[in-house]
Amino acid sequence: MNIQDYDFSGKKAIVRVDFNVPIQDGKITDMTRINGALPTLKLILEKGGALIIMSHMGKPKGKVKPELSLKQIGPAVSKALGVDVKFADDCQKADAQAAALKAGEVLLLENLRFYAEEEGKPVGIDKEDPAYEDAKKAMKASQKEFAKKLASYADCWVMDAFGTAHRKHGSTAVIADYFDKKDIMLGLLMEKEVKAVDAVLNKIERPFVAIMGGSKVSSKIGIIENLLGKVDKLILCGGMTYTFAKAHGGEIGGSIVELDKLDVARNVEELAKKNGVELVLGEDSVCCTGYDFSTFSVKPGAKVEVFPSNAIPAEFEGLDAGPVSREKFANAIKGAKTILWNGPAGCFECEDFTAGSKAIGEAIAKATAEGAFSLIGGGDSVACVNKFGLADKVSYISTGGGALLEAIEGKVLPGVAAVKGE
């Protein structure tokens, strides 16, 4: 069912959103996820429905943790919606509150993950334990009951949490079993996310350039291999630079490296050649003799210098793309018609190492202005475009990190499949 066509009048809608927002000193520091869900929530209210909002926050792993209570975001949600938001202290004991809801009213449920059943994973038992499989089966049965209870509060279910769509959790997929097909649908945010991924992977305008950053080849190998069958150019930057440099005997100083993935790096290069993909790697790096990752700052007295990425002195560590690499990346992006960016080119949190990521962001913005479709995904990449004031100069910013990566990898997302009946 399309949410625009659904008649919410006099009905209660339970909506899975991603309100896992950052909180510091009791205050929300980034409203992006809440703002992203507002069009869906407001649409339901405008069409005469009552809202039951559910989400997780953090990783309480089945335990009640006050610091992860959704109660603390209630006032912000109320203000954003322009409606007084009621709160249910227990997501599994909200029967009376849900039943009392009238059209135009809103109820926010407590953190779903205060119950282990939401994620459906046995708690307090190792996978190696002989009893694990029985515990897993028991938990899956409990997860169904958990989802059934959530479903009992409402007449329809709306999935609008792309950030958790890659998980088959009680609220993101299992709950679909307890509604008629006509009463389940994607929210407006989810629809945008699915269309954006589809545009990048299945409706490609060429040249198609993908930029993959981050620290490890191992965490991106499935995505890289899938992209090598689709893109014209693949830029690999960030910490991955040094695994590729080391794979060819380069000296990388104290830079991050996966010594057990050198063969993987070489195989990626061979696959790129086989598929006719231009693989773009950085040639130089901005390096430092003392970087504090806990404070994102250069330690007092430390040196910051530029070296070839395959000839970094022992006391230095590569932390960003150098000037030659930045120009190389920008030239590779120039003229692209489809662009995907996931992962920064360096430790952009520190001003000394922002230039690489900024160069990529600015090149993407310029290509977008010239007609390219650009999709930015992953927390750090999104943080980059926001930091550099480029958010309104790209085509689409995805709210999903892991979900986007799995979609790019070609995996079916349970949260989408549940709605589409796949």
Image (cartoon, grey):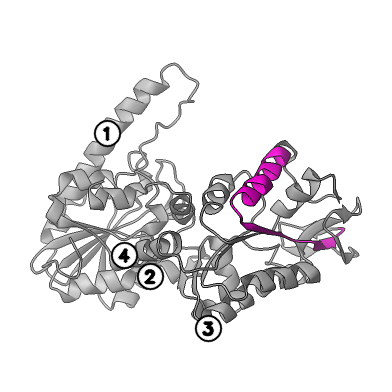
Question: Given the image, on which type of amino acid does mark 1 rest?
Answer: Ser
User: How many labels were placed on the picture?
Assistant: 4
Q: Nearer the viewer, mark 3 or mark 4?
A: 3
Which residue is nearer to you in this view: 229 or 70? Answer: 229
Q: Nearer the viewer, mark 2 or mark 3?
A: 3
- CB-based contact (under 8 Å), mark 1 and mark 4: no
Question: Given the image, on which type of amino acid does mark 2 rest?
Answer: Gly
Please check the rendered image and state whether residue 366 is part of the magenta-colored stretch, yes or no.
no
| Residue occupied by mark 4 | 191
**Distance between the alpha carbons at the discs numbered 1 and 3:** 51 Å
Is residue 139 depicted above or below 243 in this figure? above
SS assignment at label 3: helix
Quarter of the view holding residue 331: bottom right
| Residue occupied by mark 3 | 369
Question: Given the image, on which type of amino acid does mark 4 rest?
Answer: Glu
| Residue occupied by mark 2 | 36
Query: Earlier along the polypeptide chain: callout 1 or callout 3?
Result: 1
Instruction: Look at the image and give the residue range highlighted in magenta.
Output: 261-289
Query: Earlier along the polypeptide chain: callout 2 or callout 1?
Result: 2
Q: Position of residue 98 (x, y in %)?
A: 16, 57
Query: Earlier along the polypeptide chain: callout 1 or callout 4?
Result: 1
Is residue 35 depicted above or below 403 in this figure? below
Asked if one can make out residue 53 in the rendered structure from this viewpoint, the answer is yes
The local crowd at label 3, few if under 14, some if 14 to 19, many if 20 or more residues have their Cα within 10 Å, is: few
Query: Earlier along the polypeptide chain: callout 2 or callout 4?
Result: 2
